[in-house]
Image (cartoon, grey):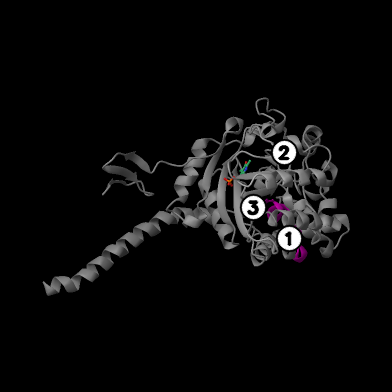
Amino acid sequence: MSVQLQNRPEAFRQFALRRAEELKQMVTPYLKQSNTIPTGFLRSELYEFRRAKILSYFDATLEDWENWHWQMTHRISDSHVLDSLLSLTAEQSMEIERVGKTFRWAVSPYYLSLMDGTDPFDPIRLQGLPTQAELFDNFGEEDPMGEEITSPAPSITRRYPDRLIINVTNMCAMYCRHCQRRRNIGETDTHSPRNQLKAALDYIRANPEIRDVLVTGGDALLLSDLTLDWLLGELHAIPHVEIKRLGTRAPVTLPMRITDELCTILAKYPPLYINTQFNHPKEVTTDAKKAADKLVAAGVVLGNQAVLLKGINHQPQIMKKLNQELLKIRVRPYYIFHAKNVKGTRHFIPRIQDGIAIMEQLRGHTSGLAVPTYIINAPKGGGKTPVSPQYLISLDENKAILRTWEGKYIQYETP
Ligand SMILES: *Cc1c(COP(=O)(O)O)cnc(C)c1O
């Protein structure tokens, strides 16, 4: 008896060691693949080299580069300029020019510096530069989310009981090729006029059930410091507005927008959440980290809303890597959105099966913190609908059948 007891811990240890070996084997294929996935951190020297090339083209300095106004006034939106900065074939250059006549495009010099000069399938290039696939889309809708019919007051979209969106601008540092609000990206960049924002604020003041206000666009951080200070201050002063959120891709496409001055303003209005949109591990760069560090120091809570895009990030290992890289810079993966059926973007729409496969490969296989919710926006403005692999196989009064993350079926007796 006593011999047996003494041996038991050893038997447990042997059991745990065998299990640990099994777990190690489980992650090994991913680790092999993971090493071949390019990340922003690994490529920082390359990015610096391209930055130098762009600066020399514009005859500009590093100080210019760090100035977000310089980045905005030097956005590349001309195929000839692009031609001097990337190695385009004559055909590619003509294609960009042709598509550009129908769909506007513009890329910040910073985002351009992340682009592969030669690979037309580079995930950064696919997000930033137009391709003729955009013209071949006869099925997509202008406004699949029905945003035009959910606006009870100027600049406001309200789809949920306790929260709403204020649209403050149609401007962005880059016009993403997968943009769901393409219809708003006209020839001109405009911020919503002050009197419209005032009307939006009046609506929020008059509706005390609104406890969460999401300021977005376009890109909310393209507002001036002055306007942001005013708008956040107004929202902060409304007692029933418990939390404020900003929607912005600036940490990804224009990280120099995150200045000390901006952070001083943001720090005044807690609790403030910023949701951004990193779609590929290549976007998680040293500059993005610097921006995230500053925002965190200002007390901002960071989240990521990735868009699932065919040919860019629809493979499980890319999404896993992206979410792990994001946790390294304190950005918590929040949503993965299934790309919407927006006219001109259909070539990016993945299969729902791709999204499910990604979620299956995340849960249990990596930190729960790296597992966002996969969302399909129901057509006609039906709202965000979570979709996930099935873990609850059956449920009745006495028992449930569960499927574990490893695919084991287990019966759970309800007490
Ligand atoms: C996405 C969205 C929100 C925010 O939704 P959460 O699930 O709370 O992040 C709010 N209003 C509208 C109109 C939206 O589309």
**Residue 67 visible in this rendered orientation of the protein:** yes
Q: Amino acid at mark 2?
A: Ala
User: Residue placed at 83% from the left, 64% from the top?
Assistant: 63
**Quarter occupied by residue 282:** bottom right
Instruction: Give the answer, above or below, for where 61 lies relative to 181.
Output: below
Alpha carbons under labels 1 and 2: distance apart: 30 Å
**Residue 113 visible in this rendered orientation of the protein:** no
Magenta extent: 244-262
Q: Is residue 143 left or right of residue 199?
A: left
What secondary structure is found at the residue carrying circle 1? loop
**Quarter occupied by residue 267:** bottom right
Alpha carbons under labels 1 and 3: distance apart: 24 Å
Residue under numbered circle 1: 258
Percent position (x, y) of residue 230? Answer: 78, 56
Alpha carbons under labels 2 and 3: distance apart: 17 Å
Q: Is residue 408 left or right of residue 290?
A: left
Question: In which quadrant will I find the N terminus?
Answer: bottom left
